[in-house]
Amino acid sequence: MKRFLIIFLTFSPVFLFSQKLYNAEFRLNSGFIAPHRIGMEGLAQKPAYGIDLCFFFDHGKNDFYDVKYNSPYTGYGIMWQNLGNPKVLGQSLTAYSFMEFNFFQSHNLMLVARINGGLTYLTKAYNKIDNPENIAIGTNVNFFFKLDLGLKYKMPHQPFTMRLSGGLVHFSNGSIKKPNLGLNHINFSLGMAYQLNQIEREASISKGNEKPEKRNEFTIMVSLVTADEYSVIPNGRGGGFLCSTGSLTYNYIYSKIGKVGVSADVFYNENLYYWYDERGDTLVKVNETPSEIIRAGISIGHELVYKNISLLSYIGVYYYNKVKPYDFMYSRFGIRYYVFNNFFINATIKAYGFKAHYIESGIGFSFKK
Protein backbone atom coordinates (compact mmCIF):
# COMPACT_ATOMS: atom_id res chain seq x y z
CA MET A 1 0.00 0.00 0.00
CA LYS A 2 2.78 2.47 0.93
CA ARG A 3 4.72 1.61 -2.24
CA PHE A 4 1.64 2.33 -4.35
CA LEU A 5 1.12 5.68 -2.63
CA ILE A 6 4.77 6.67 -3.17
CA ILE A 7 4.54 5.88 -6.89
CA PHE A 8 1.20 7.69 -7.15
CA LEU A 9 2.48 10.84 -5.46
CA THR A 10 5.77 10.84 -7.34
CA PHE A 11 4.25 10.72 -10.80
CA SER A 12 1.33 13.06 -10.17
CA PRO A 13 2.25 16.70 -10.76
CA VAL A 14 -1.06 17.67 -9.20
CA PHE A 15 0.19 16.49 -5.83
CA LEU A 16 3.66 17.96 -6.26
CA PHE A 17 2.59 21.49 -7.02
CA SER A 18 -0.81 21.84 -5.38
CA GLN A 19 -1.80 23.28 -2.03
CA LYS A 20 -4.68 20.84 -1.85
CA LEU A 21 -4.91 18.22 0.87
CA TYR A 22 -5.88 14.87 -0.69
CA ASN A 23 -7.67 11.92 0.90
CA ALA A 24 -8.94 8.51 -0.17
CA GLU A 25 -11.78 6.84 1.71
CA PHE A 26 -13.28 3.35 1.82
CA ARG A 27 -16.75 2.80 3.31
CA LEU A 28 -18.97 -0.16 4.11
CA ASN A 29 -22.67 0.60 3.64
CA SER A 30 -25.80 -1.00 4.97
CA GLY A 31 -29.46 -0.04 5.15
CA PHE A 32 -32.88 -0.78 3.75
CA ILE A 33 -35.33 0.32 1.06
CA ALA A 34 -38.00 2.65 2.49
CA PRO A 35 -41.34 2.31 0.64
CA HIS A 36 -42.87 5.78 0.22
CA ARG A 37 -45.92 4.88 -1.88
CA ILE A 38 -48.75 2.38 -1.45
CA GLY A 39 -47.92 -0.82 -3.32
CA MET A 40 -44.15 -0.57 -2.86
CA GLU A 41 -44.06 -2.61 0.35
CA GLY A 42 -43.09 -5.78 -1.51
CA LEU A 43 -39.94 -4.18 -2.89
CA ALA A 44 -38.30 -4.03 0.53
CA GLN A 45 -37.16 -7.54 1.48
CA LYS A 46 -33.67 -8.04 2.92
CA PRO A 47 -31.24 -5.40 4.21
CA ALA A 48 -29.23 -3.61 1.52
CA TYR A 49 -25.44 -3.49 1.64
CA GLY A 50 -22.53 -2.23 -0.42
CA ILE A 51 -19.13 -0.59 -0.65
CA ASP A 52 -18.05 2.97 -1.43
CA LEU A 53 -14.67 4.28 -2.61
CA CYS A 54 -14.11 8.03 -2.91
CA PHE A 55 -11.34 10.54 -3.42
CA PHE A 56 -11.61 14.09 -2.05
CA PHE A 57 -9.59 17.21 -1.30
CA ASP A 58 -9.81 20.68 0.15
CA HIS A 59 -8.20 23.92 -0.99
CA GLY A 60 -7.36 25.19 2.47
CA LYS A 61 -8.53 28.73 3.15
CA ASN A 62 -7.09 30.54 0.19
CA ASP A 63 -10.05 32.67 -0.86
CA PHE A 64 -13.29 34.18 0.41
CA TYR A 65 -15.45 31.12 -0.28
CA ASP A 66 -13.16 28.61 1.42
CA VAL A 67 -13.00 30.78 4.53
CA LYS A 68 -16.75 31.46 4.54
CA TYR A 69 -17.67 27.77 4.15
CA ASN A 70 -14.93 26.61 6.54
CA SER A 71 -12.80 24.90 3.89
CA PRO A 72 -15.28 22.33 2.50
CA TYR A 73 -14.14 19.11 0.87
CA THR A 74 -15.02 18.35 -2.75
CA GLY A 75 -14.59 14.93 -4.28
CA TYR A 76 -15.63 12.04 -6.51
CA GLY A 77 -16.52 8.44 -5.87
CA ILE A 78 -17.97 5.16 -7.04
CA MET A 79 -20.42 3.04 -5.07
CA TRP A 80 -21.80 -0.49 -5.47
CA GLN A 81 -25.01 -1.48 -3.70
CA ASN A 82 -27.03 -4.66 -3.39
CA LEU A 83 -30.54 -3.31 -2.85
CA GLY A 84 -31.81 -6.27 -0.83
CA ASN A 85 -34.11 -7.62 -3.54
CA PRO A 86 -31.87 -9.03 -6.30
CA LYS A 87 -34.70 -10.52 -8.37
CA VAL A 88 -36.72 -7.29 -8.66
CA LEU A 89 -34.40 -4.37 -7.84
CA GLY A 90 -31.04 -5.92 -8.66
CA GLN A 91 -27.89 -3.95 -7.86
CA SER A 92 -26.68 -0.41 -8.42
CA LEU A 93 -23.35 0.97 -9.62
CA THR A 94 -23.00 4.71 -9.07
CA ALA A 95 -20.53 7.42 -10.08
CA TYR A 96 -20.95 10.66 -8.17
CA SER A 97 -19.42 13.93 -6.99
CA PHE A 98 -19.95 15.60 -3.63
CA MET A 99 -19.26 18.48 -1.29
CA GLU A 100 -18.69 18.01 2.44
CA PHE A 101 -19.25 20.78 4.98
CA ASN A 102 -17.84 20.90 8.50
CA PHE A 103 -20.58 22.10 10.86
CA PHE A 104 -18.84 21.64 14.18
CA GLN A 105 -15.43 20.60 15.44
CA SER A 106 -14.11 19.84 18.90
CA HIS A 107 -10.45 18.83 18.86
CA ASN A 108 -10.32 15.79 16.53
CA LEU A 109 -14.10 15.14 16.44
CA MET A 110 -16.15 16.72 13.64
CA LEU A 111 -19.83 16.87 12.68
CA VAL A 112 -20.07 16.96 8.88
CA ALA A 113 -22.66 16.84 6.10
CA ARG A 114 -22.25 15.65 2.51
CA ILE A 115 -24.35 16.52 -0.52
CA ASN A 116 -23.92 13.91 -3.28
CA GLY A 117 -25.15 13.82 -6.85
CA GLY A 118 -24.45 11.67 -9.90
CA LEU A 119 -25.67 8.86 -12.14
CA THR A 120 -26.39 5.25 -11.26
CA TYR A 121 -26.91 2.09 -13.30
CA LEU A 122 -29.55 -0.27 -11.92
CA THR A 123 -29.24 -3.82 -13.18
CA LYS A 124 -33.02 -4.35 -12.86
CA ALA A 125 -35.71 -2.06 -14.26
CA TYR A 126 -39.43 -2.48 -14.94
CA ASN A 127 -40.30 -4.87 -17.75
CA LYS A 128 -43.86 -5.99 -18.40
CA ILE A 129 -42.72 -9.57 -19.09
CA ASP A 130 -39.48 -10.16 -17.17
CA ASN A 131 -39.86 -7.80 -14.20
CA PRO A 132 -43.44 -6.53 -13.74
CA GLU A 133 -43.04 -6.25 -9.94
CA ASN A 134 -40.60 -3.34 -10.18
CA ILE A 135 -43.16 -0.53 -10.14
CA ALA A 136 -40.57 2.00 -8.92
CA ILE A 137 -38.03 2.40 -11.74
CA GLY A 138 -38.58 2.25 -15.51
CA THR A 139 -35.00 2.78 -16.75
CA ASN A 140 -31.60 1.27 -16.00
CA VAL A 141 -29.80 4.65 -15.93
CA ASN A 142 -31.04 6.99 -13.22
CA PHE A 143 -30.14 10.13 -11.34
CA PHE A 144 -28.57 9.66 -7.90
CA PHE A 145 -28.98 11.97 -4.91
CA LYS A 146 -27.70 11.42 -1.40
CA LEU A 147 -27.66 13.49 1.78
CA ASP A 148 -25.28 12.34 4.52
CA LEU A 149 -24.82 13.45 8.12
CA GLY A 150 -21.87 11.97 9.98
CA LEU A 151 -19.27 12.06 12.72
CA LYS A 152 -15.56 12.01 11.86
CA TYR A 153 -12.67 11.29 14.19
CA LYS A 154 -9.14 12.26 13.14
CA MET A 155 -6.59 9.99 14.80
CA PRO A 156 -3.90 12.09 16.54
CA HIS A 157 -0.55 12.12 14.72
CA GLN A 158 -1.90 9.61 12.18
CA PRO A 159 -3.06 9.97 8.55
CA PHE A 160 -6.29 8.07 9.29
CA THR A 161 -9.80 9.41 9.89
CA MET A 162 -12.78 7.27 10.91
CA ARG A 163 -16.34 8.08 9.91
CA LEU A 164 -19.80 6.98 11.08
CA SER A 165 -22.66 8.39 9.03
CA GLY A 166 -26.27 7.96 8.01
CA GLY A 167 -28.34 9.41 5.22
CA LEU A 168 -30.97 9.10 2.52
CA VAL A 169 -30.30 7.83 -1.01
CA HIS A 170 -32.76 8.55 -3.82
CA PHE A 171 -32.81 7.02 -7.31
CA SER A 172 -35.02 8.57 -10.00
CA ASN A 173 -35.06 9.03 -13.77
CA GLY A 174 -36.78 12.42 -13.61
CA SER A 175 -39.92 11.15 -15.39
CA ILE A 176 -37.98 10.39 -18.57
CA LYS A 177 -39.88 7.11 -18.68
CA LYS A 178 -42.55 5.54 -16.52
CA PRO A 179 -42.77 4.00 -14.02
CA ASN A 180 -40.86 6.52 -11.93
CA LEU A 181 -41.99 6.33 -8.34
CA GLY A 182 -38.31 6.36 -7.39
CA LEU A 183 -36.41 4.42 -4.77
CA ASN A 184 -35.56 5.74 -1.31
CA HIS A 185 -32.78 3.96 0.53
CA ILE A 186 -31.98 4.64 4.20
CA ASN A 187 -28.21 4.24 4.33
CA PHE A 188 -25.69 3.81 7.16
CA SER A 189 -21.95 3.60 6.66
CA LEU A 190 -18.68 3.04 8.48
CA GLY A 191 -15.58 4.35 6.76
CA MET A 192 -11.87 4.95 7.00
CA ALA A 193 -10.03 7.75 5.16
CA TYR A 194 -6.31 7.98 4.50
CA GLN A 195 -4.56 11.32 4.00
CA LEU A 196 -2.42 10.98 0.88
CA ASN A 197 -0.11 13.98 1.22
CA GLN A 198 1.40 16.43 3.66
CA ILE A 199 1.61 20.15 2.94
CA GLU A 200 2.68 23.28 4.76
CA ARG A 201 0.03 25.94 4.55
CA GLU A 202 0.15 29.61 5.31
CA ALA A 203 -2.21 31.12 7.84
CA SER A 204 -5.78 31.59 6.68
CA ILE A 205 -6.48 34.75 4.76
CA SER A 206 -9.01 37.28 5.94
CA LYS A 207 -12.61 36.67 4.97
CA GLY A 208 -12.62 39.92 3.08
CA ASN A 209 -15.66 42.00 2.29
CA GLU A 210 -18.88 39.99 1.93
CA LYS A 211 -20.52 42.75 -0.09
CA PRO A 212 -20.59 41.94 -3.81
CA GLU A 213 -19.22 44.34 -6.39
CA LYS A 214 -22.57 44.32 -8.20
CA ARG A 215 -25.93 43.83 -6.49
CA ASN A 216 -28.26 43.49 -9.49
CA GLU A 217 -28.30 40.65 -11.99
CA PHE A 218 -30.52 39.50 -14.85
CA THR A 219 -30.32 35.95 -16.22
CA ILE A 220 -32.01 34.03 -19.02
CA MET A 221 -32.27 30.24 -19.15
CA VAL A 222 -33.73 27.76 -21.66
CA SER A 223 -34.02 23.98 -21.38
CA LEU A 224 -35.05 21.21 -23.75
CA VAL A 225 -35.71 17.59 -22.72
CA THR A 226 -38.20 14.75 -23.14
CA ALA A 227 -40.34 13.21 -20.40
CA ASP A 228 -43.21 10.77 -19.86
CA GLU A 229 -45.85 11.61 -17.24
CA TYR A 230 -48.24 8.82 -18.24
CA SER A 231 -48.19 5.08 -17.74
CA VAL A 232 -50.14 2.91 -20.15
CA ILE A 233 -50.61 -0.37 -18.28
CA PRO A 234 -48.65 -2.58 -18.20
CA ASN A 235 -45.86 -0.35 -19.50
CA GLY A 236 -44.90 3.29 -19.79
CA ARG A 237 -45.49 5.10 -23.04
CA GLY A 238 -41.72 5.18 -23.41
CA GLY A 239 -40.97 8.88 -23.27
CA GLY A 240 -40.73 11.16 -26.25
CA PHE A 241 -42.92 14.03 -24.99
CA LEU A 242 -41.05 17.28 -25.59
CA CYS A 243 -40.66 19.55 -22.56
CA SER A 244 -39.08 22.99 -22.40
CA THR A 245 -38.65 25.89 -19.98
CA GLY A 246 -37.76 29.52 -20.58
CA SER A 247 -36.98 31.85 -17.68
CA LEU A 248 -36.07 35.49 -17.26
CA THR A 249 -34.84 36.18 -13.72
CA TYR A 250 -33.89 39.22 -11.69
CA ASN A 251 -31.57 38.56 -8.73
CA TYR A 252 -30.65 40.84 -5.87
CA ILE A 253 -27.16 39.78 -4.76
CA TYR A 254 -27.16 40.42 -1.02
CA SER A 255 -23.84 38.66 -0.43
CA LYS A 256 -21.08 36.93 -2.36
CA ILE A 257 -22.68 33.64 -1.30
CA GLY A 258 -26.35 34.43 -1.80
CA LYS A 259 -28.97 35.82 -4.17
CA VAL A 260 -32.72 36.26 -3.88
CA GLY A 261 -34.69 36.51 -7.07
CA VAL A 262 -37.97 36.67 -8.92
CA SER A 263 -38.42 34.78 -12.19
CA ALA A 264 -40.88 34.95 -15.07
CA ASP A 265 -41.24 31.39 -16.36
CA VAL A 266 -42.85 29.83 -19.43
CA PHE A 267 -43.34 26.05 -19.67
CA TYR A 268 -44.09 23.87 -22.69
CA ASN A 269 -44.97 20.26 -21.87
CA GLU A 270 -46.37 17.95 -24.55
CA ASN A 271 -47.60 15.52 -21.88
CA LEU A 272 -50.44 18.01 -21.40
CA TYR A 273 -51.86 17.24 -24.84
CA TYR A 274 -53.14 13.94 -23.41
CA TRP A 275 -55.49 12.53 -20.83
CA TYR A 276 -55.09 8.99 -19.56
CA ASP A 277 -58.25 6.89 -19.82
CA GLU A 278 -57.89 4.20 -17.14
CA ARG A 279 -60.87 2.17 -18.37
CA GLY A 280 -59.67 2.05 -21.95
CA ASP A 281 -56.02 1.92 -20.92
CA THR A 282 -55.18 4.50 -23.57
CA LEU A 283 -53.94 8.04 -23.95
CA VAL A 284 -56.57 10.34 -25.39
CA LYS A 285 -55.51 13.59 -27.05
CA VAL A 286 -57.68 16.32 -25.55
CA ASN A 287 -55.70 19.44 -26.53
CA GLU A 288 -54.71 20.35 -30.07
CA THR A 289 -52.74 23.61 -30.06
CA PRO A 290 -49.64 24.78 -28.16
CA SER A 291 -51.57 27.70 -26.67
CA GLU A 292 -53.71 25.18 -24.77
CA ILE A 293 -50.78 23.52 -23.01
CA ILE A 294 -48.34 26.40 -22.52
CA ARG A 295 -48.22 27.58 -18.92
CA ALA A 296 -46.68 30.75 -17.51
CA GLY A 297 -45.87 31.62 -13.93
CA ILE A 298 -44.02 33.86 -11.51
CA SER A 299 -41.64 32.32 -8.97
CA ILE A 300 -39.44 33.57 -6.16
CA GLY A 301 -36.39 31.84 -4.80
CA HIS A 302 -32.83 31.77 -3.58
CA GLU A 303 -29.38 30.84 -4.88
CA LEU A 304 -26.64 29.64 -2.54
CA VAL A 305 -23.28 30.30 -4.17
CA TYR A 306 -19.95 28.53 -3.79
CA LYS A 307 -17.39 29.72 -6.34
CA ASN A 308 -18.84 28.72 -9.74
CA ILE A 309 -21.63 26.51 -8.34
CA SER A 310 -25.12 27.67 -7.32
CA LEU A 311 -27.82 25.67 -5.52
CA LEU A 312 -31.29 26.86 -6.53
CA SER A 313 -34.65 26.62 -4.74
CA TYR A 314 -37.69 28.33 -6.26
CA ILE A 315 -41.46 28.16 -5.74
CA GLY A 316 -44.04 29.76 -8.01
CA VAL A 317 -47.66 30.11 -9.09
CA TYR A 318 -49.18 30.02 -12.56
CA TYR A 319 -50.98 33.10 -13.89
CA TYR A 320 -51.69 31.42 -17.26
CA ASN A 321 -52.78 27.79 -17.07
CA LYS A 322 -55.57 26.31 -19.20
CA VAL A 323 -54.88 22.67 -18.28
CA LYS A 324 -54.95 20.95 -14.90
CA PRO A 325 -56.08 24.04 -12.97
CA TYR A 326 -55.49 22.26 -9.66
CA ASP A 327 -51.75 22.38 -10.49
CA PHE A 328 -51.67 26.05 -9.54
CA MET A 329 -48.19 25.91 -7.98
CA TYR A 330 -44.80 24.57 -9.01
CA SER A 331 -41.30 24.27 -7.60
CA ARG A 332 -37.81 24.13 -9.03
CA PHE A 333 -34.75 22.75 -7.23
CA GLY A 334 -31.32 22.01 -8.56
CA ILE A 335 -27.88 23.25 -9.50
CA ARG A 336 -26.16 25.68 -11.84
CA TYR A 337 -22.55 25.45 -12.89
CA TYR A 338 -20.89 28.55 -14.32
CA VAL A 339 -18.58 27.33 -17.07
CA PHE A 340 -17.51 30.93 -17.69
CA ASN A 341 -18.24 34.12 -15.78
CA ASN A 342 -21.56 34.69 -17.55
CA PHE A 343 -22.42 31.31 -19.13
CA PHE A 344 -23.92 28.49 -17.03
CA ILE A 345 -25.29 24.97 -17.35
CA ASN A 346 -28.64 24.39 -15.61
CA ALA A 347 -30.02 21.17 -14.11
CA THR A 348 -33.16 21.65 -12.00
CA ILE A 349 -36.20 19.51 -11.22
CA LYS A 350 -39.49 21.11 -12.15
CA ALA A 351 -42.21 19.60 -9.97
CA TYR A 352 -45.65 19.96 -8.41
CA GLY A 353 -45.66 18.79 -4.84
CA PHE A 354 -43.60 15.60 -4.73
CA LYS A 355 -44.28 14.73 -8.38
CA ALA A 356 -41.44 15.48 -10.80
CA HIS A 357 -42.55 16.80 -14.19
CA TYR A 358 -39.16 16.84 -15.89
CA ILE A 359 -35.49 17.75 -15.50
CA GLU A 360 -34.78 21.26 -16.75
CA SER A 361 -31.50 20.49 -18.53
CA GLY A 362 -30.37 23.60 -20.35
CA ILE A 363 -28.07 26.58 -20.64
CA GLY A 364 -28.24 30.18 -19.51
CA PHE A 365 -26.55 33.55 -19.50
CA SER A 366 -26.01 36.15 -16.77
CA PHE A 367 -25.87 39.82 -17.72
CA LYS A 368 -23.90 40.71 -14.60
CA LYS A 369 -20.35 41.94 -15.31
Image: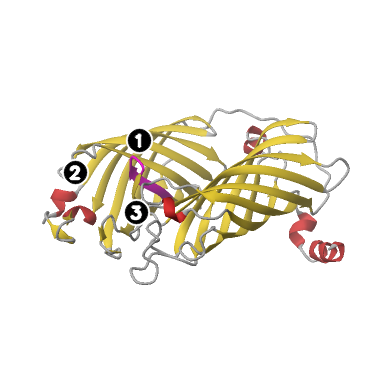
Separation of marks 3 and 1 at Cα, in angstroms = 18 Å
Q: Earlier in the sequence, mark 1 or mark 2?
A: 1
Q: Indicate the secondary structure of the residue bearing disc 2.
A: loop
Residue 13, quarter of picture: bottom right
Where residue 153 sits in the image (x, y, percent)?
Answer: 77, 40
Q: Residue at x 56, y 60 (%)?
A: 94
Tag nearer the camera, 3 or 1: 1
Tag nearer the camera, 2 or 3: 2
Tag nearer the camera, 1 or 2: 2
Which residues make up the magenta segment?
A: 347-354
The amino acid marked with disc number 2 is Lys
Q: Residue at x 21, y 38 (%)?
A: 326
Residue 44 within the segment the image draws in magenta: no
Q: Which mark is residue 223?
A: 3
Which coloring applies here? secondary structure
241 versus 38 height, above or below: below
Where residue 226 sits in the image (x, y, percent)?
Answer: 31, 60
Q: Nearer the viewer, residue 35 or 161?
A: 35
The amino acid marked with disc number 3 is Ser
Q: Which mark is residue 324?
A: 2
